[in-house]
């Protein structure tokens, strides 16, 4: 009676079915694990490489060129997945190197097509090359080298059923013109400030030798923070500089204090000689009050009282430009009586704003460098340990 009234538990039936399914799955997994690695790799390769695709890889001998220079181009056909060269030397694919053509298109900075060149495969190994001499009429700028594969539908299909997309590479052409005139601008002083009179000389020569003609047109201008400077001597009303045997003098006045903000000054000279035009320019060494730099370096690293020492210094503007004609004095000042002070050394630069001095620091004294030239540079304290 109990057997007749027995009803199977649905949960147990479901659990039994799941156990059977798990057992079958484990058997299937074990059979695959016993398979050799080659048998596992084959279906994966079939999926990935059944339809390989190829790219063009472009190389040039360098990145920057000038006109009249050769540009060497080499293009290789690479497998997009393995990054290996296309096997042109295999028997069934040798015909590709004879039937496939690659063309290089030169695209200018404005996007215009300027030239078209066919690449060659001299060795039959699917490495296409060409040499192009850059014509003088090509202006400076960034160019593109675009390479396309051509060979008809049959050839494209034969390469495993896929075409070869175009490839591009950038290169730059720089235009360079050798100067035919060189000049040098020299200032009499190493630094100037508000309202100073700036004077100096100009020497202009031809590169091939000799000075420019006295009849050459030489235009000069000077400005500080965009404000034009007033010339006094050596320049006429048309800003023409008087030149004699390639040599001239100039003199102008810097703007006043209220007109100068950053102190960015420049003198510019335009030379016109026998159809050649060149520009010569130089920064005006303007030192605003308290903005000059003086780096003081003791020979031993530090200064100590009663020990003789050499001290090196480097004078620069606030733009880190060397002050060539720096002059100053080292003062010895008594601590308890500042009115008692004495000059113990004279400072002057020897080369590129550098110089040195010698002294023996004494107890109960302090030392200060006071700048004579350029003006308004300020004073600098010499630290003693």
Image: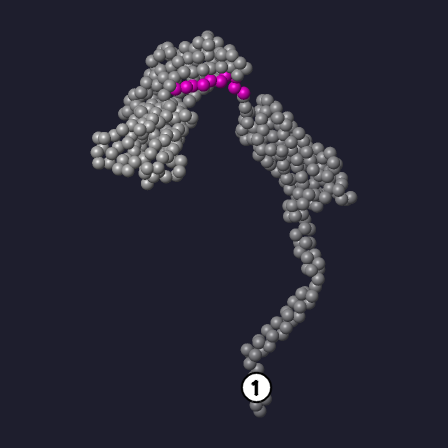
In this picture, residue 30 sits left or right of residue 351: right
Residue 152 is inside the magenta segment: no
The residue that appears at 71% across and 39% down in the rendered structure is 126
Please provide percent x and percent y for residue 302.
Answer: 37, 39
Q: 82 or 312: nearer the eye?
A: 312
Please provide percent x and percent y for residue 27.
Answer: 66, 70
Chief secondary structure of the magenta portion = strand
The residue that appears at 41% across and 10% down in the rendered structure is 242
Residue 245, placed above or below residue 329: above
Find disc 1 in the rendering and name its residue. 6
Tell me where the magenta segment starts and ends, as one range.
178-187
Residue 28, placed above or below residue 181: below
Please provide percent x and percent y for residue 21.
Answer: 62, 72
- Whether residue 261 is visible, yes or no, is no
The residue that appears at 42% across and 19% down in the rendered structure is 185
Quadrant of the rendering where the C terminus is positioned: top left
Q: Residues within 10 Å of mark 1 (few under 14, many from 20)?
A: few
Quadrant housing residue 269: top left
Q: 71 or 11: nearer the eye?
A: 71
Q: Secondary structure at mark 1?
A: loop
The residue that appears at 66% across and 54% down in the rendered structure is 47
Quadrant housing residue 3: bottom right
Quadrant of the rendering where the N terminus is positioned: bottom right
């Amino acid at each position: 009676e109990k057997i007749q009234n027995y009803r199977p538990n649905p949960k147990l039936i479901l659990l039994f079915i799941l156990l059977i399914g798990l057992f079958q799955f484990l058997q299937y997994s074990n059979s695959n694990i016993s398979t050799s690695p080659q048998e596992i790799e084959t279906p994966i390769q079939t999926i990935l490489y059944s339809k390989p695709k190829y790219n063009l890889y472009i190389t040039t001998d360098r990145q920057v060129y000038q006109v009249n220079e050769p540009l060497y181009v080499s293009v290789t056909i690479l497998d997009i997945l393995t990054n290996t060269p296309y096997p042109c030397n295999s028997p069934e694919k040798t015909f590709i190197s004879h039937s496939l053509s690659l063309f290089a298109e030169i695209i200018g900075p404005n996007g215009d097509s300027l030239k078209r060149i066919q690449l060659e495969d001299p060795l039959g190994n699917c490495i296409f090359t060409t040499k192009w001499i850059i014509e003088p009429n090509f202006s400076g700028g960034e160019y593109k080298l675009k390479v396309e594969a051509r060979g008809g539908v049959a050839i494209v299909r034969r390469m495993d059923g896929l075409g070869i997309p175009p490839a591009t590479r950038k290169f730059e052409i720089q235009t360079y013109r050798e100067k035919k005139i060189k000049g040098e601008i020299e200032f009499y002083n190493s630094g100037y400030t508000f309202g100073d009179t700036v004077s100096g000389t100009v020497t202009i020569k031809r590169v091939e030798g000799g000075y420019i003609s006295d009849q050459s047109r030489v235009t000069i201008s000077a400005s500080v923070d965009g404000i034009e400077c007033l010339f006094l001597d050596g320049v006429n009303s048309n800003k023409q500089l008087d030149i004699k045997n390639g040599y001239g003098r100039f003199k102008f006045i810097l703007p006043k204090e209220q007109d100068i903000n950053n102190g960015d000054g420049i003198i510019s000279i335009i030379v016109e000689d026998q159809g050649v035009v060149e520009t010569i320019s130089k920064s005006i060494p303007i030192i605003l009050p308290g903005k000059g730099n003086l780096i003081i370096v003791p020979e031993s690293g530090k200064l100590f009282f009663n020990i003789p020492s050499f001290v090196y210094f480097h004078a620069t503007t606030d733009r880190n430009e060397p002050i060539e004609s720096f002059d100053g004095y080292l003062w010895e000042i008594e601590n308890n009586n500042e009115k008692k002070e004495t000059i113990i050394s004279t400072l002057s630069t020897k080369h590129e704003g550098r110089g040195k001095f010698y002294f023996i620091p004494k107890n109960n004294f302090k030392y200060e460098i006071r700048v004579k030239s350029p003006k308004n540079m300020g004073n600098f304290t010499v630290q003693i340990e």
